[in-house]
Amino acid sequence: MRLEPIRIEGQTLQLPPIKLIVPVVVVVFLAFVAWTTVYTVAAESEGVVLRFGRFSKTVAPGLHFKMPLGVDRVKVVPVRRQLKQEFGFGTTEARNPWQSTTPDEWEDTKAMVTGDLNACLVEWVIQYRIEQPKDYLFKVRNADATLRDASESVMREVVGDRTVDEVITIGRQEIEAEALLKLQTLVAEYEMGIKIDQVQLKNVNPPEKVQASFNEVNQAQQEKESAINIANGEYNKAIPKAKGEAEQKIRAAEGYAQKRINEAEGDVAAFNALLFEYLKAPEVTKLRIYLETMGEVLPLVRKKVIIDESVKGLLPLLNLGNGEGIAMEGTR
C-alpha cells in the first residue's frame, strides 16, 4: 500500500510509508506502558495501591512496579513526616496544603467566647502524623479538612469552660492538655488514621479595644506574684534559721538538765556510800570526815597557831595588836 502525496497550495507533502509509522507507534506505546508501570515512593512516605479504584495494598519506600494503563493507581502518603495545622494565623511556604487557611478567615477562627461571656483571640497549632494510610484515605472524606473542623470544635469547647483570666494567664497548660486529650479521643472515634502529637497555644490575647486594660491587669498580677515569691523567699530563709536556733537552745537545755541530774545522782551515791560507812563505824567515820574537812580548810588560812588544850592563857602567846592573830584550841 502506498500513500499518495498531498498537494497543499502548490506544494507537495510526501507522507512516510505506513510501514515506518507502525513501528514508531508501537515504540511510543511500549514506552508509555513502561512509564506507567514503574513508580517510586519517597523515604518518608508509604504508597497505597488502588486497583480499579479499590484498595489493594500498601508498599514501603523504594522502587516498585504496578499494572499499567491506569489499572493500578498509587497514592503516596507521608506517614513519617510531622505535619501541623495552624489556626488563627499562618506561615508562608508551608508544604502541607491544609496547614493554614486564607488570611481573611483568621479573625473568625481565633475569635472565641469564654465561660464568663468575655471575648478573646486564641491562636493555636496542632502537630500530627498519619499512622494508618488506608484509614486516612478511605474511612473519612478529606481527613485533613475534618481534622481542622474537629480541632476548632474542641478548642472552642475547652475555652468556653474557663474564664478569660484562666485562658489568658494561668490556664494555658490545662487548656493544651485537655484539648489534646479530647482531640485524640475524637480522632480515634472517627478512625481517621491520624495520631495527634501536640496541641500548643500560641498567642492568646483579649480583643484589641480592651487589650491595654488587660495588659495592666496582667502586669498587676505579675507584680503580685513577684511580691508573693519575695515574701516566700524571706519566710523560707527566716523560719529555718529560727527553727535551728530554737533546736540549739533546746539541746543545750536538755544537756544542762542531764548534767544536773547526773551530778545530783552522783552526790546521792556519794552520800549513800558515806552513810553506809558511817553506820558501820560511826566514830571512825566522824574522825575521818573531820580530818578531811580540816585538810581542805587549813590551807586557806594564812597563819596557823596550834595550842594544846592544857594551856590556860592565850594572851602572852598572841600578838593581837595588828588583828591578825588566830586562836584555835588544839586537837588531841
Image (cartoon, helix red, strand yellow):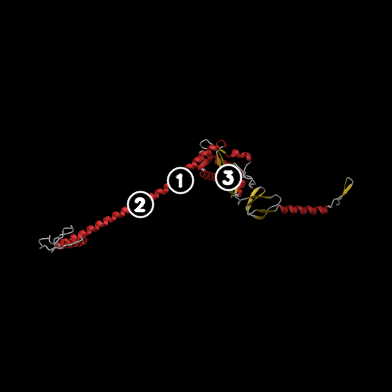
Instruction: Give the CA separation, mark 2 to mark 3.
Output: 55 Å
Of callouts 2 and 3, which one flags the residue occurring earlier in the amino acid sequence?
3
Report crowding for label 2: few under 14, some 14 to 19, many 20 or more residues within 10 A (C-alpha). Answer: few
Mark 3 or mark 1, which is nearer to you? 1
Going by the image, does 282 lie left or right of 96?
left
- Give the numbered dot on residue 64: none
Residue placed under numbered mark 3 in the picture: 125
Q: Residue at x 88, y 48 (%)?
A: 12
Question: Which quarter of the figure is the C terminus placed in?
Answer: bottom left
Task: Tell which tag, 2 or 3, sits nearer the viewer.
Answer: 2
Are discs 2 and 3 less than 8 Å apart at CB? no
How much space separates mark 3 and mark 1, taking CA atoms?
35 Å
Q: Residue furthest right?
A: 10
Quadrant of the rendered structure where residue 291 is?
bottom left
Q: Position of residue 287 (x, y in %)?
A: 15, 62
Compare residues 301 and 49 and report the one nearer the observer. 301
Find residue 247 and report its horizontal and vertical position in percent.
Answer: 35, 52
Label 1 vs label 2: CA separation?
Answer: 26 Å
Residue 163 in the image: state x and y as whole percent.
Answer: 50, 38
Q: Callout 3, which amino acid?
A: Val
Q: Which residue is mark 2?
A: 247
Tell me the kind of residue under disc 2. Answer: Glu
For marks 3 and 1, the one nearer the N-term is: 3
Q: Residues within 10 Å of mark 3 (few under 14, many from 20)?
A: many
Q: Quadrant of residue 87?
A: top right
SS for dot 1: helix
- Tag 1–tag 2 contact (CB < 8 Å): no
Residue 120 or residue 315, whichever sits in front: 315
Residue matched to label 1: 230
- Asked if residue 160 shows in the view, the reply is no
